[in-house]
Every structure is written in structure tokens, then in C-alpha cells.
Amino acid sequence: MKESYNGEDVLIKDVEVQGRRVNIKVEGGRFAAIGEEAGGEADVVIEGRGAVALPGLYNTHTHAAMTLLRGYADDMLLQAWLSEKIWPLEAHLTGEDVYWGTQLACLEMIRSGTVGFNDMYFFMDEAARAVDKMGMKAQLAYGFIDLFDEEKREKEIKATEALVSSIQAMNNPGIKAAVGPHAVYTVSEEGLSWCAEFSRQQNIGIHVHLAETEQEVTDCVAKTGVRPTQVLDRCGLLTPRTVAAHCCWLDSDDCALLGDRGVFASHNPTSNMKLAVGRAMPYGLLKERGAGLCLGTDGCSSNNNLDMFEEMKFAALLQKFFWHSPTILPAGEALAMASANGAEALGFKGGRLEVGAPADLVLLDRRAACNTPLYNAVSNAVYACNGGAVTTVLCDGRVLMQDGVVPGEAEVLDGARQAIAGLLERHQASVSE
Ligand SMILES: C[C@H]1O[C@@H](n2cnc3c(O)ncnc32)[C@H](O)[C@@H]1O
Ligand SMILES: [Zn+2]
């Protein structure tokens, strides 16, 4: 994990980058040289023959510790799924559960080529400890849910302030704090406005669910007279630091507003299809209006994995299917959403294979069936492969996985299994009380 590779120089020999065979030199966590001439001494030498290099991937919307709830409740509509199954179980989560659940998520993300993610959940100081241990990068937000209750709002404010202080005290440039107002149907306008003002004062990100279902929009219009996007805007939450997850039921004025405010829309096609939200994010309109576009898996209970390769494919296919256009969201754009755009959405500079950029890199097995034949590496990455083809992952130059080995994997799996057993036991005890 992080400690064993931190600060080491890396040389990747004879690897394929955009159709060329090159060497890649990493110094001080950044790409120092990419080309035939790159070489010299290095602490770690990786044989790249037989591999294709891609930028490291960024998952811009997830609830990492929900790995513990994978397969716990499937085949339901969002509101019933949350209120009947997910929230009653989450009520029994502990900080220790989130620590192990987040490590399990990191393990799965590393194995499938993700180097950074945007998380909204509970006990987030424990999530931060897990991210630090696993050597990834993340933007972490406490899921602020006041349910329109003033007393609860005060508690959520304190929890948000405490998380921001504890992350700032960690002094890890790869771990950033954000505010996480859950959605317009769970947070009062007072709570939303407080989050906006606090994020402005602290200059930190905003992570919010937006227009996931038609019901969210119709209920919001009935209650407030305006659409969810306008509620967020009048509370000050639409900014270039904002990642709005889902964005399925946006109309053209909503898209224009997100574009004008410089918001990043995180597309979550797998979760949207599984929860049958009934509409795909209006990718074409958002792009035309200049909004940022990135990709996320959502939590492991609505996906049910964290594989950004699958997410790229489903994004491209869902857009083509829903908007009746084979040309919308081509493979290159899906990869950009999952890499450089995602990094930018979270305020990181990585996700690009360029000299001077942070060394976020994924090696894919070019001998795998999904890479045979290899006319076009980006086409194969998006349409043919999944995370199973990833062999090696670097995050800011740290080697998190080499030739399929992630150090500490058995301990993480063990800890997660124990956390799941404890969580189910506590839940069961409360049901039989
Ligand atoms: C942080 C809270 O958000 C819940 N959650 C997980 N997935 C979704 C989703 O698709 N829409 C809305 N809320 C979601 C999670 O269970 C936490 O309670
Ligand atoms: Zn979500």
C-alpha cells in the first residue's frame, strides 16, 4: 500500500501509449518523461511489454462503504429501496464498519483502475483513514440530511464542520473535504444554504444528488413552485466546485443553468438503469451548454460494483439507446469523462498521460481476449474490456497494484467480512426486539 511505494521513482519499460511503444518515467509522483528515450535509474522497474497504458480513472459519485450492502436489496424503485431497506440497515452502521467498507471499496476500485473518487456517506473521518491507508485520492463529504428539522440540522452542521477540520488536520493533499447536502427532498433550504455558504468560506467542493427521478422534480415543483435545479441555485449550491450526481430529469433550462454556473454533472448510468429512473441524463444538451461532464458508479447497492470500465460502456450505450443516436458519447468522450474530466471535477490535476501531470496510470493486459485484436485501444477499453483486464495501477506515482497484486488484500477482505457480520447481527437484534 501507500507507505511501501511513497516517493519512489518508477520506470515502465516498453509500454503501448496511443499506438506507440514508449517508456514512461515517473519522478516525484509526476510523469517526468514519456517516449522511447525515457529511462535511467528507478526504484521500481515495471515491464510494460504486453500492456497498454491509459490514464488513471476517477469515480465522481459513490457511497464507498455501501460495498457492505452489495446485493442486500435489489430490484426496487429508489424511494422504497432507500426507506424500506437501505436507511433501516444504515441506522446500525458504526465508524469501524465504514473504515472496512471503504477499504473494501478502495480495493475494488484499485483492482479496476480507479485512482480517485468522490464520496458522500457517514463516519467520514473513518473513510478518510481508509483512503489514506489504501493510497488513493478522494473528495469526502458527510451526507447532510436534516429532513427539514431544525434540531437535526444543527447536528448535521456540527458533523460537517468536524469532518472538514479532521480532514484538514490530516494534511494529505490527496484527501479533500467537501460538503454533501444529500438532495432537495431530504435537506431544507436553510440546510442547503448553510452548505453553500460554508463551502464558499472554506473553498471546498459540493457533492449533491440532483434530479434523479421524475418524482423528485414533480414533488419539488409542487412544494416550492420551482424545479430542483432552481432550488439549488437560489441556495447558492451551483458553482464550478459542485458535482451534481445523476441529473437525469433536467430540462433544457436546467442544462443551461448548470452550464452557466460551471457545474459538473456526474452521469451514473448503471444505477439509473437498475433503479429504473426512466430517463438518461441529457448528455447532448449539457455538453452544448458547457456543463462539466464526468462519470460515477453510485454506491455498491445500486450498481452493484465500482468498475469504471463497465460504467464507461453503459454510459455510451445508454446515451445512444435513449437518445436514438449511435454517434452520441463516443468512446474517447467516455474515457475523458472517466479520467481527466473526473479529476478536474474533484479539483485534482491527474487523469491525463502527460509530462508534468500527476502520475495516475493504469496498465491493461494487451494479451487479454478483450484486447485481441487491438485495432483501437480506447475502443477496446470502453466497449470490450472491464476492470478485470487491469494489471497495474499508479496513483500520484504510488504503485497501488503491480501485476495483479494489491498488498494487504486478504486483511481488507477479512475486516470487511467481519464488519458485515456485525452489522447484520445488530440489525437483526433490533428487528427482533
Ligand atoms: C448518503 C446517503 O445517500 C444514500 N444513497 C445511496 N444511493 C442513493 C441514490 O441513488 N439516490 C439517493 N440517495 C442514495 C445512501 O444510502 C446514504 O443514506
Ligand atoms: Zn448516490
Image: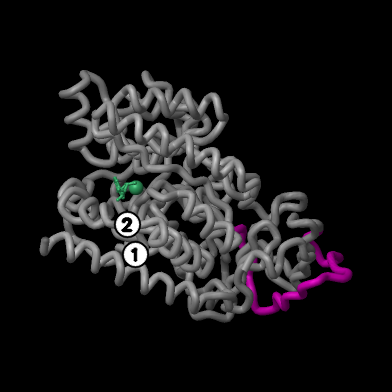
Q: Nearest the camera: 213 or 417?
A: 417
Instruction: Report if residue 226 lies within the magenta region.
Output: no
The structure residue drawn at horizontal position 36% and vertical position 38%, both measured from the top left corner, is 144
Name of the residue lying farthest toward the left: 432
Q: Amino acid at mark 2?
A: Leu
Q: Is residue 203 left or right of residue 268?
A: right
- Is the N terminus in the top left, top right, bottom left or bottom right quadrant? bottom right
Q: Image height check: is 423 above or below 406?
A: above
Q: Is residue 230 visible?
A: no
Where residue 211 sits: x, y (%)? 29, 36
Label 2 Cα neighbours within 10 Å, binned few <14 / some 14-19 / many ≥20: many
Q: Which residue is mark 1?
A: 68
Where residue 402 sits: x, y (%)? 63, 75
Name of the residue lying farthest toward the right: 40
Q: Amino acid at mark 1?
A: Leu
Labels 2 and 1: the sequence-earlier one: 1
The answer for how far apart the CA atoms under marks 2 and 1 are is 10 Å
Residue 93 bears which disc, if any? 2
Q: Image height check: is 195 above or below 306?
A: above
The structure residue drawn at horizontal position 70% and vertical position 52%, both measured from the top left corner, is 358
Q: Is residue 46 left or right of residue 417?
A: right
Q: Nearer the viewer, mark 2 or mark 1?
A: 2
Q: Nearest the camera: 205 or 428?
A: 428
Where residue 108 sits: x, y (%)? 46, 67
Disc 2 residue lies near ligand 1 with CB under 8 A = no
The structure residue drawn at horizontal position 53% and vertical position 41%, both measured from the top left corner, is 177
- Give the structural element (helix, strand or loop) at label 1: helix
The structure residue drawn at horizontal position 48% and vertical position 27%, both measured from the top left corner, is 198
In the image, which residues are magenta?
Answer: 33-56
